Image: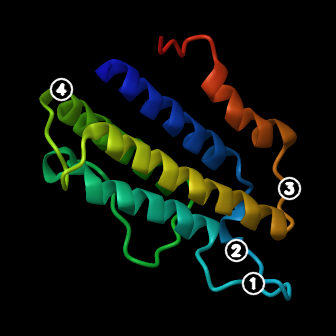
């Protein structure tokens, strides 16, 4: 089951990077709009991705943080910085999950599958906010990107049975 859980994380991470690689440059400053059409004071797309990375870093554990980039609070990193950070934090999460799942170690009385579920739910929630901010800001994502996200879950190599 350890390898299956890690494969679920890898697919989830592919989706994050798939989206991140395809956002037009002008989309990184997009924010959601309020009912009156004014921009919210919420995070921009760039800051939302930085937030996801920061939450990962908080759960990785010091021994797996080597080489993982970090951002200052409120930073708005660009695509290349975010991709590098996501690759590093994804490796760290994968290593942490593997150890937790193999040893039965618990984090704050939670098992490794709970951590996996939390991270996927949290990041998926923010991906939805990111897509909404892009749409409301008039940044058009190609159709193959909007629907291609889901194809990652159904590719043939994902064999969890």
Q: Secondary structure at mark 4?
A: helix
Which residue is pictured at 58% across the width and 59% down the height? Answer: 126
Q: Does 54 sit above or below residue 8?
A: below
- Residue 127 vs residue 133: left or right? left
**Marks 3 and 1, how far apart in space?**
17 Å
Mark 2 = which residue? Answer: 31
Local crowd at mark 1 within 10 Å, few (<14), some, or many (≥20)?
A: some
**Marks 4 and 1, how far apart in space?**
46 Å
Residue 88 visible to an observer of this rendering: no
Residue 140 is labelled as: 3
Residue 125 visible to an observer of this rendering: yes
Q: Earlier in the sequence, mark 2 or mark 1?
A: 2
Residues under numbered marks 2 and 1 in contact, where contact means CB atoms less than 8 Å apart? yes
**Marks 2 and 3, how far apart in space?**
14 Å
Mark 2 or 4: in front is 4
Mark 1 = which residue? Answer: 39
**Marks 3 and 4, how far apart in space?**
43 Å
Residue 102 is labelled as: 4
Q: Secondary structure at mark 3?
A: loop
Q: Earlier in the sequence, mark 2 or mark 4?
A: 2
């Amino acid at each position: 089951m350890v390898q299956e859980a890690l494969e679920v994380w890898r697919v989830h991470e592919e989706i994050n990077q798939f989206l991140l690689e395809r956002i037009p440059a002008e989309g990184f400053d997009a924010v959601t709009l309020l009912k009156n059409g004014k921009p919210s004071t919420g995070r921009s797309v760039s800051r939302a991705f930085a937030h996801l990375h920061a939450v990962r870093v908080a759960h990785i554990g010091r021994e797996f943080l080597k080489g993982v980039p970090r951002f200052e609070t409120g930073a708005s990193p660009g695509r290349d910085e975010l991709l590098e950070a996501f690759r590093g934090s994804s490796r760290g999460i994968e290593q942490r999950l593997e150890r937790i799942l193999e040893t039965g170690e618990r984090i704050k009385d939670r098992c490794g599958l709970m951590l996996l579920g939390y991270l996927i739910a949290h990041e998926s929630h923010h991906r939805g906010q990111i897509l909404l901010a892009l749409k409301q800001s008039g940044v058009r994502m190609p159709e193959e990107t909007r629907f291609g996200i889901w194809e990652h879950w159904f590719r043939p190599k994902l064999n969890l049975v």
